[in-house]
Image (cartoon, rainbow, N blue to C red):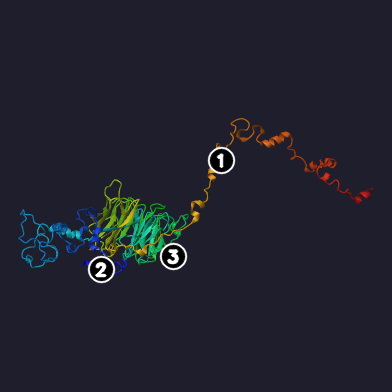
Amino acid sequence: MEDEAEIYDGIRAQFPLAFGKQQKSQTSLEAIHNATRRSTAGAAASAAGAAASTASNSNNKTNEALPSLSSDSKAWLDSLRNSKSPNPNPNDSVIGPPRPPPGPVPDEDDEDVMVGPPPPPPGSGEDDDNDVMIGPPRPPVGPSSDSEEDEEEENRYRIPLSNEIVLKGHTKIVSALAIDHSGSRVLSGSFDYTVRMFDFQGMNSRLQSFRQLEPFEGHQVRNLSWSPTSDRFLCVTGSAQAKIYDRDGLTLGEFVKGDMYIRDLKNTKGHISGLTCGEWHPKTKETILTSSEDGSLRIWDVNDFKSQKQVIKPKLARPGRIPVTTCAWDREGKCIAGGIGDGSIQIWTLKPGWGSRPDIYIEKSHSDDITGLKFSSDGRTLLSRSFDGSLKVWDLRQIKAPLKVFDDLPNNYAQTNIAFSPDEQLFLTGTSVEKESTVGGLLCFYDCSKLELVQRVGISPSCSVVQCAWHPRLNQIFATSGDKSQGGTHVLYDPTLSERGALVCVARAPRKKSVDDFEAPLVIHNPHALPLFRDQPSRKRQREKILKDPVKSHKPELPITGPGHGGRVGSTKGSLLTQYLLKQGGMIKETWMEEDPREAILKYADVAEKDPKFIAPAYAETQPEPVFAKSDSEDEEK
């Protein structure tokens, strides 16, 4: 055997290391999902008499087959998993949990401690050792029936909370979220002015975005919305212009901005102040809705970025411009709801000849700005979320008072929204972190029919939860969170309840680097970048500084008082020293302003003729004698 091993090693050494089929170590799905499992302490906190969270479901087949075990059975299963004792009787083929010890059913007054789940009732035929028991043990009979009802009530909602992943990348809180209808792509917008695009189909366990956009420099991203066909999406920022991108993040266009000097908003071509919200029409792929701080809602045609279809001015108690803080379509796209800065909710029905007068007007619905509105699928119920820390449920057939008001929901962000579960049994919203509070950002679930709190789920101990969504196809819950230094999108899922989405990318390991991926760093030789060839730094400022310094510039000291004070001679009457000396010597006479120039020249004619100094002596020897002709008039006079 040793000789064969040596021969094999010798032959194997002649081949490259990459030769032959390489066996990859595969990680089981159970181990992968255990790595993303949420802690029981922070996953869920019961509220309003609700039972414990459904996040305690396990991935293995035993728990999949036990949706409604009692608390005693669950405790027994947990102790069984933690124990490492071998099977006492390996010959028995038992499918599912081990059989309870044989024997009669003990009475409740019996002081003996029973190990394992309670035995089945007598006469069932399962006491025979030759029979194979399939499935979970039967729950105990008697007083434990109440706990079974609690478990059924708990599992009725089927909230996917057992596992969690976080899509990171933003440096500030994530304020906008959009998942396309197929559930393959996720958009997240943040206060760091960027939008990140995630693709579940192309993403591995590193959870990195494949594209990053900055729609408007210096403007926060406030809302994102996919088109009904998921081929384009709308991006709403703090600027006055909304942008449209295609599915891959390429800019298709931006809407026009209005003239801020026109007082009537209906005469402007677009918004004149920062946008607050925007949503795509749920049915029509050419129509979108935007709301703005200028106090108007506008409906746009995506095919024409330079004109709007409709301008809606809310009803106000007094003339002015009050911002519209949020807007929403109903499920069919026949109604528009707007949250106004004065605390009112106004709803318009799209019909022929409709105008700005609202069909439903809820005055003073909240005491502060409204951050989110959501219609139910039947269009009869409206949910509203506000800065005042409340969530209200409205019946649109009776709008005098809300059906229910949920308080103690702190909210510090203008983008905090509300979402429905796929079957609309529940609705959920996020909470913000307060300075003095020890409770972090929560996700609160409410029952639509009973209008009561079902569960509070802890998302982050130090970050606020802003936007949330429950995707119907993936059956996964998305919640955005963050603070001034970080931001991310939490994805909650359950391997037994959810489909695709996070399940796909978590199980995909990142590709290992091979030899072919190695790239030598490029070395660029630039001799003029060496210190020898660099230009000397400019010393202009240094020279100017030296000139201002009297010591370094050797400047003489100026007289403080007397003649020459300030650099001038005191007796010159404001003139320069040269002008003063010329005036005193008589070389400068200021009579030339009063003399006739012709007379001033002619008075030197006789002197120049008698005593020439310059021109005449130079030509005295060669100059001919001038002979002047006598005029005819002189001859006639003679």
Q: Nearer the viewer, mark 3 or mark 1?
A: 1
- In this view of the protein, which residue sits in the foreground, 14 or 447? 14
**Crowding near pointer 2: few (<14 within 10 Å), some, many (20+)?**
few
Q: Which residue is mark 1?
A: 547
For badge 2, the amino acid type reads: Ile
The Cα–Cα distance between marks 2 and 1, rounded to whole angstroms, is 89 Å
- In this view of the protein, which residue sits in the foreground, 451 or 150? 150
For badge 3, the amino acid type reads: Asp
Q: Where residue 313 sits: x, y (%)?
A: 40, 57
Where disc 1 sits, the SS reads helix
Residue 67 shown left or right of residue 193 in the figure: left
Where disc 3 sits, the SS reads loop
| Residue under the point 30% across and 48% down | 434
- In this view of the protein, which residue sits in the foreground, 511 or 93? 511
Q: Which residue is mark 2?
A: 7
The Cα–Cα distance between marks 3 and 1, rounded to whole angstroms, is 64 Å
Residue sitting farthest toward the front: 3
Q: Which residue is mark 3?
A: 304
127 up-or-down from 581: above or below: below
Residue 161 shown left or right of residue 296 in the figure: left
Residue sitting farthest toward the right: 638
**Crowding near pointer 1: few (<14 within 10 Å), some, many (20+)?**
some
For badge 1, the amino acid type reads: Leu
Q: Where residue 545 sits: x, y (%)?
A: 53, 41
Residue sitting farthest toward the top: 562
Q: Where residue 448 sits: x, y (%)?
A: 25, 59
